[in-house]
Amino acid sequence: MKKCTKYLIIVNETKDVDLKWSGFTYDALKAKGFEVNMYVGLESEGVEGYLKDTDVIIVMGGDGTILRVAHILAGRQIPVIGVNLGTVGFLTEVGVTQISSMLERLSNGDYELEERMMLSGRVHLNGTSSEGTSSDGTTPEGGRCIDIQALNEIVLARDNALRIIALRILVNGSHFDTCEADGIMIATPTGSTGYNLSAGGPIVQPDARLMVMTPISPYSLSRRSVIFGADDHITLELLQKRKDAPSKGLLSHDGEESISMEVGDTVEIEPSKDKLLLVKLDESSLYEILTRKLGN
């Protein structure tokens, strides 16, 4: 692979107290004569100016930090490698004791790149549809459309802690199912080891191209996860559950900002054209990594 000489370090300051490890990495790269910038924080506006002419981004934090960086990149094909300062760390590649080795391998081009699929979602609020949507995300009827992306998952869940919600599921424009549950999750292979795993969904090889739909606490004895292909298009519509009580939902992507949804609102989900490039140094298989990180 390409030898890395231009570096950007993005730091989650809540994880790297006093910038101990990011400072160590910065100094080590400078000592080798490489170009290096460091940005402390996760605001997309602040990072923008550092992305040009960057060979690799070193992320100091945990999986949540990498998710945020994936959103900031918005499809830019800049390789990312994470130094785990969190807990489990499925997306982060190395620990703090491996920083020096990581820098050596990056500078020598001794690494592989792995493409990770992302999801694209369009939220139609107030019962709007994709027809008639203007460039600013509004419709003639006064509705609103919001475009989102996710590396792990998109979740439509209940807004009320005591009531389940009803959702109509369409696949490629045709009715697939109606589900009563705490919510529905559409996950990528990357996200299969996250919330999807906690909800009882299957683990998928991370470089696959498919979508996993997993119900969250379904009101059913037989409902299971379903795998969809990379060419499929999934629509979730919030239905009225009870006549005497409003049905409301909350939509989130990668655990970020929740969007309030009401009866008739929909979200359309499909694989995104964008993808995240992750630097891989560890030659262990997914199953070896799972055993190491989750095994007893």
Image (spheres, rainbow, N blue to C red):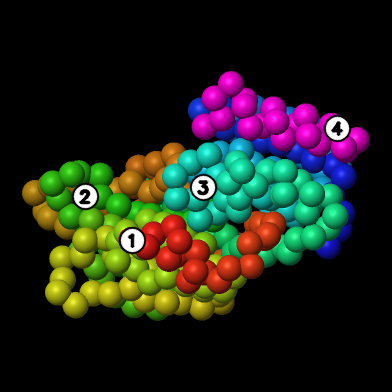
Instruction: Locate residue 65, reporting x and y percent.
Output: 55, 41
Check disc 2: other Cα within 10 Å, few if <14, some if 14-19, many if 20+: many
Residue with the mark numbered 1? 296
State whether residue 131 appears in this view: no
Measured Cα–Cα span from mark 1 to mark 4: 41 Å
Q: Which mark is residue 58?
A: none
Q: In this view, does 205 lie to the left or right of 74?
A: left
Quick one: label 4 or label 3, which is nearer the N terminus?
Answer: 4
Q: Which mark is residue 247?
A: 2
Q: Which residue type carries mark 3?
A: Asp
What distance separates the C-alpha of mark 3 from that of mark 1?
Answer: 21 Å
Label 4, on which residue?
31
Q: In this view, does 70 lie to the left or right of 270?
A: right
Specify which label sits upstream in the sequence, 1 or 4: 4
| Label 3: few (<14), some (14–19) or many (≥20) C-alpha neighbours in 10 Å | many
**Relative height, residue 19 to residue 115 (above, below):** above
Tell me: residue 90, above or below residue 231: above
Q: In which quarter of the image is the C terminus?
A: bottom left
* Along the line of sight, the residue nearer the viewer: 255 or 170: 255
At a point 57% along the width and 60% down the height, the residue shown is 118
Distance CA(mark 2)–CA(mark 1):
41 Å
- Residue at the disc numbered 3: 63
Crowding around mark 4 (Cα neighbors within 10 Å: few <14, some 14 to 19, many 20+) is few
Give the extent of the magenta segment.
Answer: 15-36
Q: How far apart are marks 4 and 2 (CA)?
A: 59 Å
Instruction: Tell me which amino acid carries mark 1.
Output: Asn
Disc 4, SS: helix
